Image: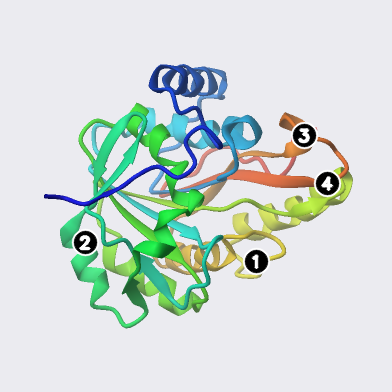
Amino acid sequence: MATIRTPAVAGLFYPANPQCLLENIGCLLSSAQVSRCLPKVLIVPHAGYIYSGVVAASAYVTLKLIAECVRRVVLLGPAHRTFLHGLALPREAIFATPLGQVRVDATAAEKIARLPQVSINSSVHALEHSLEVQLPFLQYLLEDFSILPVVVGRASVDEVSGVLDCVWGGEETLIIISSDLSHYLPYAAAQREDNKTAASILELHQEIDHTHACGATPINALMAVARKHCLIPHLLDLRNSGDTAGSTDRVVGYGAFAFMSQDVPKRTGYAS
């Protein structure tokens, strides 16, 4: 019998009631600006939906154009709850949310588990929210798909890019990097820092550190791999919790980016 990773943050980061969750996601997606992006990779925030859901939706709405092609989603997000050396896969074969179950791609998991930097560690995944909060959006938009959930701990850019290279695939594979941006700065300072981070990502400069983004390591690895594949980064949205549902005294920054093979009109920072 397949083992199941049960949701850790349903009712905290997003609604636990399936109907309320569907309505919440539908509302967020309907308010998102439609883009002509055909993404290979998305960078998406991972706070509670009340804070970062609108930014996440600006990334996920792009999947409407490629949903029929996507059969596997590779998810990389930083470890928040448990110290981790390297990268970790779950032992569980299924991830559950209030919207149902998603199977883990066993073949891809077996492939990257052979890499020395990758371990099997269910305890790292048990309470980790950075990957879980992405799943309901994917379930809403995609039909028949599997996931490869990878938590990133203390690892080098080369170690993470090695994993990305292994599972890059073709149009059937979507890659999602889960990351928030600056943390707990005053509103204006956060805007300045997040604009700098966005500029670095758009220029594919591997200058991001963990004060700029909690997912700095997978973002830097993505930029290295994106250069090899000639992908073009595009900023979809950039806000912070002071713009959405929080105080402006200490805010968290959220950015949504798409990496694709074609160019589209550019945005470079916070909306004026």
Q: Secondary structure at mark 3?
A: loop
Q: Amino acid at mark 2?
A: Ala
Of callouts 2 and 4, the N-terminal one = 2
Disc 2/disc 4 C-alpha distance (Å): 40 Å
Disc 4/disc 1 C-alpha distance (Å): 21 Å
Q: Amino acid at mark 3?
A: Gly
Is residue 130 placed above or below 66 in the rendered structure?
A: below
Of callouts 4 and 1, the N-terminal one = 1
Pointer 3 local density, CA inside 10 Å: few below 14, some 14–19, many at least 20: some
Pointer 4 local density, CA inside 10 Å: few below 14, some 14–19, many at least 20: some
Q: Looking at the rendered structure, which numbered label has been put on residue 246? A: 3
Residue 93 in the image, given as x and y percentages of width and height: 22, 53
In the picture provided, is 242 more to the left or to the right than 208?
Answer: right
Q: Which colour style is shown?
A: rainbow
Of callouts 1 and 3, the N-terminal one = 1
Residue 174 in the image, given as x and y percentages of width and height: 34, 48
Residue under the image location 51 percent in, 63 percent down: 79
Read off the residue under disc 4. 250
Q: Looking at the rendered structure, which numbered label has been put on residue 238? A: none
Disc 2/disc 3 C-alpha distance (Å): 39 Å
Closer to viewer: mark 4 or mark 1:
4
> 218 and 148: which one is in front?
148
Q: Secondary structure at mark 4?
A: loop
Give the quarter of the figure containing the C terminus.
Answer: top right
Closer to viewer: mark 1 or mark 3:
3
Residue under the image location 51 percent in, 25 percent down: 34
Read off the residue under disc 2. 108
Q: Amino acid at mark 1?
A: Ile
In the picture provided, is 155 more to the left or to the right than 109?
Answer: right
